[in-house]
Amino acid sequence: YLRKFVGKPCGLIYDFGCGTGAISKRFVDFNSTEVSLIGVDLSPETVACSKMQCRSLRSRFRVADLSQLTSFPDEWPLASGIWSSFLAAYFPGKNLISVLQQWVTLIRPGGWLCILEIDGLFSGHQPLD
């Protein structure tokens, strides 16, 4: 599905809501010589799992609130693209629009934003406290 939505990724990619790093690892494995990746999640536990799962020198992971990224713009270099899967439900209503407006400021001209979601995400899944 990475090829279908993103094509052949290159440059810096953000994996927002990286969870345990499964998708992050796929990005780096898919094109390891032309991709660098920054995975971001609110949970220190899942970021620790990501670091264990994706040990590439081209990847790094950090804990951050994805609704507050532009509060520290110098910490976030412009990226070729942003991948986010199953995260929009954590930002209900107008908050999602505000978050996405922040995210797009982190994308280079001509870059991409891919948001993967499913209907009824919280019917069997609850956000972490």
Image (cartoon, rainbow, N blue to C red):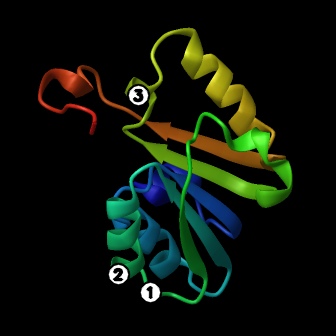
Please state the total of marks drawn on the protein image: 3
Please give left or right for residue 128 compared with residue 14 in the image: left
Q: x%, y% of residue 47?
A: 41, 65
Q: Looking at the image, which residue sits at the far left?
A: 124
Which amino acid type is marked by label 2?
Met
The structure residue drawn at horizontal position 60% and vertical position 66%, both measured from the top left corner, is 38
In the picture of the structure, the residue carrying the numbered disc 1 is 55
- Provide the secondary structure element on which disc 2 rests: helix
Does the image show residue 77? no
Residue linked to disc 3 = 90
Q: Relative to 69, does residue 98 appear above or below in the rendering?
A: above
Marks 3/2: CA distance?
25 Å
Dot 2: within a 10 Å radius of its alpha carbon, few (fewer than 14), some, or many (20 or more) residues? Answer: few
Measure the C-alpha gap from mark 3 to mark 1: 28 Å
As drawn, the label of residue 52 is: 2
Mark 3, Cα crowd under 10 Å, few <14 / some 14-19 / many 20+, is some
Q: Quadrant of residue 66?
A: top right
Q: SS at mark 1?
A: loop
Asked if labels 1 and 2 touch by Cβ distance under 8 angstroms, the answer is yes
Residue 6 at x, y = what percent?
57, 53
